[in-house]
Image (tube, rainbow, N blue to C red):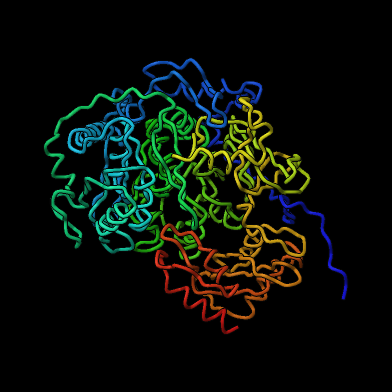
Amino acid sequence: MAEKEVVETSEAQIAVHWQEEKYIYPSTEFIAQANMTDKTIFDRFSLDNFPNCFKEYADMLTWYEYWHTTLDTSDAPCFKWFVGGKINASYNCVDRHLKEYKNKAAIHFVPEPENEKIEHITYQELYARVNEMAALLRDFAGLKRGDRVTLHLPMTAELPITMLACARLGVIHSQVFGGFSGKACADRIVDSGSRVLITIDAYYRGGALLDHKEKADEAVAAAEKDGQKVDKVLVWQRYPGKYSAKTPVKDGRDYFVNDLLKGYYGARVEPERMDAADPLFLMYTSGTTGKPKGCQHSTGGYLAYTAGTSKYVQDIHPTDVYWCMADIGWITGHSYIVYGPLAIAASSVVYEGIPNYPDPGRPWRIAQELDVNIFHTAPTAIRALRKIGPDEPKKYNYHFKHMTTVGEPIEPEVWKWYYEVVGKGEAAIVDTWWQTETGGFLCSTLPALAPMKPGSAGPGVPGIHPIVYDDEGNVVEPGTGKAGNICIQNPWPGAFQTIWGDRDRYVRQYYERYCKNPDSKDWRDWPYMTGDAAVVAADGYVRILGRIDDVINVSGHRLGTKEIESAALVVEEVAEAAVVPVAHEIKGREPDLYVSLKPGYQASAEIEKKVMDAIVSEIGKIAKPRHVWIVPDMPKTRSGKIMRRVLGALSNKQPEGDVTTLANPEIVEQIKEMVTKA
């Protein structure tokens, strides 16, 4: 038997086989109207001008008092920005716009049922509703500056109103994604020490009016078992004046917000003058294992960073209609549906339902009706819409000038469909890379200054200076074709301040590995470790290969799962692809590939072979999967993410664990039967 090939690849490096895509340039019409056409921005935001460069973003806001220290590193790596500054996020997102924009829409709320009217909330109405809610939270719920409150709300207008009311009082909000279970909500109530839970009776999802109140009861009971008592549950009503849930109301604990608000009509609440470094909110990352981490985001630094990146990366003007199709339950919704866009007086769309209800044309009808001209969504949604309605966008008369993609790497084939079909070849695309912890974009092209490159996130945005390290802490130079652990050399205002109640975990997980001196107060000694693998091209464009954990070591070759998935999507029939590692006694690991097909195609041996051949031709024999499984659908979370953990368990003949929280748990049994029989 031939001796096993030994490949010298360090643990941090990944064999990268794919070729860089060609540049695509934005239209001259886009460049002519862009917010950022000044190439010197990268000089102004260079490391030589750090940290004072971020004054540009902070100056976009209205401050009660100016700061005396731009960056305080005395408690490194818990950095503090704009120290001494006094500010209020609610004032900056609402009050200060009234003079010029009070009659302009701040929020367009689109209900899922198409027979219900779109609600257009002006800045004046938002001001009134936020004030009344703030008065209720202060006077009825007894909430004050520094208290934590848990929100478990779906995508309705009441969510941003509640967040802004909390911010007005200096109350730290912790919003839990509406699709999460009562138990997941309880974990966050306990960790944050919330004694008030704000929820809704019901909301629409896929055409059904779901009872959401039952999750509140589960959450309160589970939290109490863990030692955290919830005194009040405030329940918004999906239809004011009518209770839409089957779950009974508990006297003395549950209160209808819509009824209580009648007592606060016309109330006005003076915004709290918060220190810039005071926490604005907690955003819990939802790992499949381990205790959820409460990422603590600041008031002044976070708001400055989301405002600056909304204006310059997403090119949002006050005259635009901007739709980010994320959920406010995730960081994308906090930064780029609520705080960033509203801080710069945008009109932001909030859509209640799923993109394909009642059919895949829904997003494009909404875009046409509201004349949306900036669109922002995740590759998960783009792949799903490409799968179920590849020709739908052509049927509608809308025109995007700009489109954002976020949340995970986007495969070049999917990027091209997004550009040519959704964007009609007119829109500039920014492929953004960032994380819950980072508060805002880390890498992206600035659309009027640099061309787009399918599959690449682009270089660091102004003020962000990425660096790639191998395991020994050596720099992996751009253009070498080698990948490694991507880190950020410098702090930035949007970054989270710490993990709520667990500074040691914060330091250990994000800074310890590449820290040059643990006693140092110099920011240069504390690069931020993202936990993502990446390769940087000679031109500085970054291609994210997924989490460092999502790497398959095949005979010493470390292959990024995203690259194999991208190769599978080159095959015309394939809509979605997911790669998982399978144990192999000689190779160590080998990839198993799951694919689902576009409508109109049936599973066949021919398609399996086409996929296998595509991977060999795009990457090489080393990446050839053990098996190509053509499945009717992927197991997915309620937010549409493919649960690779479940597929990995099935491929390795391991228990698949709890699948009850999936959007389609029944699919797991079908796939299991298929894999077991083979």
**Residue 581 percent across, percent down from the top left:** 64, 66
**Residue 47 percent across, percent down from the top left:** 65, 25
Q: Is residue 588 left or right of residue 57?
A: right
Q: Is residue 292 visible?
A: yes
| Vertical comparison of 211 with 312: above or below | below
In the image as oriented, which residue stretches furthest toward the bottom?
677
Q: Pick the quarter of the image with the C terminus.
A: bottom right
Nearest the eye: 489 or 58: 489
Q: Is residue 120 left or right of residue 633?
A: left
| Vertical comparison of 391 with 280: above or below | below
Q: Quadrant of residue 434?
A: top right
What residue is rendered at 62% in x and 75% in y? 607
**Residue 344 percent across, percent down from the top left:** 40, 30
Q: Pick the quarter of the image with the N terminus.
A: bottom right
Q: Is residue 16 left or right of residue 526?
A: right
**Residue 325 percent across, percent down from the top left:** 42, 49
